Image (cartoon, rainbow, N blue to C red):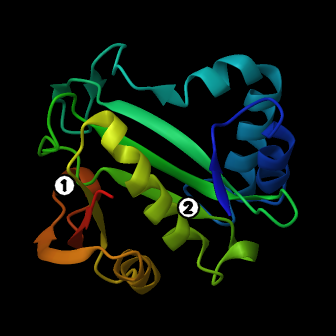
């Protein structure tokens, strides 16, 4: 498995995953998947460009509670199976320029999603380790990873990648007030 910058070349693999009903936010929301396919097919260049914003440019973000907050820098990678070139999932990195600290409205540096038919093979852990080796180019000293406390698979993935447990906390109203856990992964 390797991390790849999203590209026109890899776009058919991504679209194939969407056409199977998977989206980065759900395993089986065919309606949202269909909408994403239509958008990506019609606007592929702008879709791909929007996956990479290392300077954090653009309009501020409006949160559900009405607060308007600065846009964070971010970079998204696609996980590609090195054996057959198929799409495995995605991992994204978000950060605040000039510091490893995150603002209170962002619960972690990393988000990831693996397609159901590729789960259980260690891809997410590999992606976390690879991303931790690249994160120093963004002047980060560590990567925070948070997830719902009940998400045992993501917790196990973080631990296998070498992340250490930091705390259990309430994620707040923006995230449905779920009980969450925070892990920290050293850069290197």
Callout 2 secondary element: strand
Q: x, y (%) of residue 29?
A: 68, 59
Above or below 97: residue 179: below
Image: 108 above or below 96:
below
Give residue 85's position: percent from left, percent from top: 84, 56
Q: Residue at x 84, y 34 (%)?
A: 9
Q: Position of residue 47 (x, y in %)?
A: 65, 25
Q: Quadrant of the N terminus?
A: bottom right
Q: Quadrant of residue 188?
A: bottom left
| Residue nearest the viewer, comparing 178 with 105 | 105
Relative to 33, does residue 88 appear above or below in the rendering? below
Q: Which residue appears farthest toward the front when viewing the image? A: 188
Give the residue displayed 27% in from the left and 27% down from the top: 62
Looking at the image, how many numbered discs can be counted on the residues?
2
Q: Sequence-wise, which precedes: disc 1 or disc 2?
A: 2
Decide if residue 115 is on the left or right side of residue 42: left
Q: Are marks 1 and 2 in contact (CB under 8 Å)?
A: no
Mark drawn on residue 41: none
Q: Which of labels 1 and 2 is toward the front?
A: 2
The residue that mark 1 highlights is 173
Image x and y of residue 143, in percent: 27, 56
Find the distance from the CA under tag 1 to the CA under tag 2.
Answer: 23 Å
Q: Residue shown at 59%/53% (left/top)?
A: 90
Locate residue 11: give its quadrant.
top right
- Residue 39 vs 148, above or below: the answer is above
Q: What residue is shown with label 2?
A: 113
């Amino acid at each position: 498995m390797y991390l790849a910058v999203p590209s026109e070349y890899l776009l058919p693999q991504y679209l194939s995953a969407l056409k199977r009903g998977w989206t980065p936010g759900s395993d089986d929301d065919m309606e949202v998947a269909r909408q994403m396919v239509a958008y990506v097919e019609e606007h592929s260049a702008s879709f791909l460009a929007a996956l990479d914003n290392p300077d954090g440019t653009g309009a501020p973000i409006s949160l559900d509670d009405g607060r308007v907050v600065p846009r964070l820098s971010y970079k998204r990678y696609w996980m590609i199976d090195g054996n057959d070139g198929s799409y495995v999932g995605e991992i994204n990195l978000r950060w605040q320029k000039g510091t490893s600290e995150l603002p209170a409205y962002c619960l972690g540096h990393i988000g990831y999603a693996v397609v159901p038919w590729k789960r259980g093979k260690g891809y997410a852990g590999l992606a976390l380790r690879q991303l931790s080796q690249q994160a120093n180019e963004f002047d980060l000293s560590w990567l925070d990873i948070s997830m719902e406390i009940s998400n045992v698979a993501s917790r196990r993935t973080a631990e296998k990648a070498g992340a250490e447990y930091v705390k259990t906390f309430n994620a707040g109203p923006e995230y449905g007030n779920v009980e969450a856990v925070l892990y920290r992964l050293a850069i290197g």
